[in-house]
């Protein structure tokens, strides 16, 4: 049986590149070596067991957040098209060590969102939207989802081990 909590998605295969089996990857990882350093990786279709692959080479397309990868066993456009939509996954225990104040995406998902001096639970983190400014997607207790800028001024405290973070949203942010 596939154990979802032992694997993390680091990217998605979005398109073939050329005729020789190269594939385009949309990354969901801040560690470029996962897409450029040759070696063992895994791909996964839907909720099936991951399949081990060997990354031969990978490069970032200049000016885009897309990598082009060459993997062993995918040697033509047809075989590349067959794996569009598959995820690139890694064992969760292979995560790099981070410095203080840095967090893995998967550690933030599911945290309680708390507010105010009493740290009242107002919802849960459901996603982290990467971009110029990262945004936490928080599902409030009533079911409404809001986007909160992931900056120290608004999210001053994060307790991964205790599974919560504190937000101090500016007036009106949660009502949008």
Image: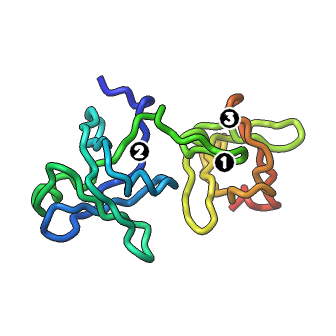
Q: Residue at x 28, y 41 (%)?
A: 44
The relative height of residue 165 versus residue 11 in the rendered view (above or below) is above
Q: Secondary structure at mark 1?
A: loop
Q: State the residue position of label 3.
A: 160
Q: State the residue position of label 1.
A: 102
Q: Secondary structure at mark 3?
A: loop
| Of the pair 53 and 121, the residue shown nearer to us | 53
- Mark 1–mark 3 contact, CB under 8 Å? no
Q: Residue furthest right?
A: 117
Q: Which quadrant is the C terminus positioned in? A: bottom right
The relative height of residue 43 versus residue 162 in the rendered view (above or below) is below
* Mark-to-mark CA distance, 1 and 3: 11 Å
The relative height of residue 138 versus residue 78 in the rendered view (above or below) is above
- Mark 3–mark 2 contact, CB under 8 Å? no
Q: Residue at x 63, y 65 (%)?
A: 133
- Mark 1–mark 2 contact, CB under 8 Å? no
| Of the pair 91 and 120, the residue shown nearer to us | 91
* Mark-to-mark CA distance, 3 and 2: 20 Å
Residue 8 image offset from top left, x and y in percent: 43, 40
Tell me if 59 is positioned left or right of 106 in this view: left
| Of the pair 123 and 132, the residue shown nearer to us | 132
Residue 109 image offset from top left, x and y in percent: 57, 41
Q: Secondary structure at mark 2?
A: strand
Residue 42: mark: none
Residue 98 image offset from top left, x and y in percent: 62, 44
Q: Residue at x 59, y 40 (%)?
A: 97
* Disc nearer the start of the sequence (1/2): 2
* Disc nearer the start of the sequence (1/3): 1
Q: State the residue position of label 2.
A: 9
Choose mark 1 or mark 2, whichever is in front.
Answer: 1
Q: Which quadrant is the N terminus positioned in? A: top left
């Amino acid at each position: 049986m596939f154990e979802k909590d032992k694997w993390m998605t680091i990217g998605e295969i979005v398109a073939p590149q050329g005729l020789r089996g190269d594939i385009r990857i949309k990354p969901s990882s801040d560690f470029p070596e996962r897409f450029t350093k040759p070696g063992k990786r895994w791909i996964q279709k839907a909720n099936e067991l991951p399949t081990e692959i060997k990354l031969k080479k990978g490069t970032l397309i200049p000016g885009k957040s897309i990598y082009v990868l060459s993997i062993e066993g995918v040697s033509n456009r047809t075989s590349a098209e067959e794996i569009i939509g598959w995820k690139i996954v890694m064992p969760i225990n292979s995560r790099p060590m981070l410095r203080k104040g840095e967090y893995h995406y998967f550690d933030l998902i599911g945290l309680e969102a708390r507010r105010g001096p009493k740290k009242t639970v107002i919802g849960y983190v459901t996603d982290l939207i990467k971009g110029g400014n990262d945004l936490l997607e928080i599902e409030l207790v009533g079911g409404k989802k809001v986007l909160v800028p992931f900056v120290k001024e608004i999210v001053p405290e994060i307790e991964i081990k205790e599974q919560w973070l504190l937000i101090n949203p500016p007036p009106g942010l949660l009502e949008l």
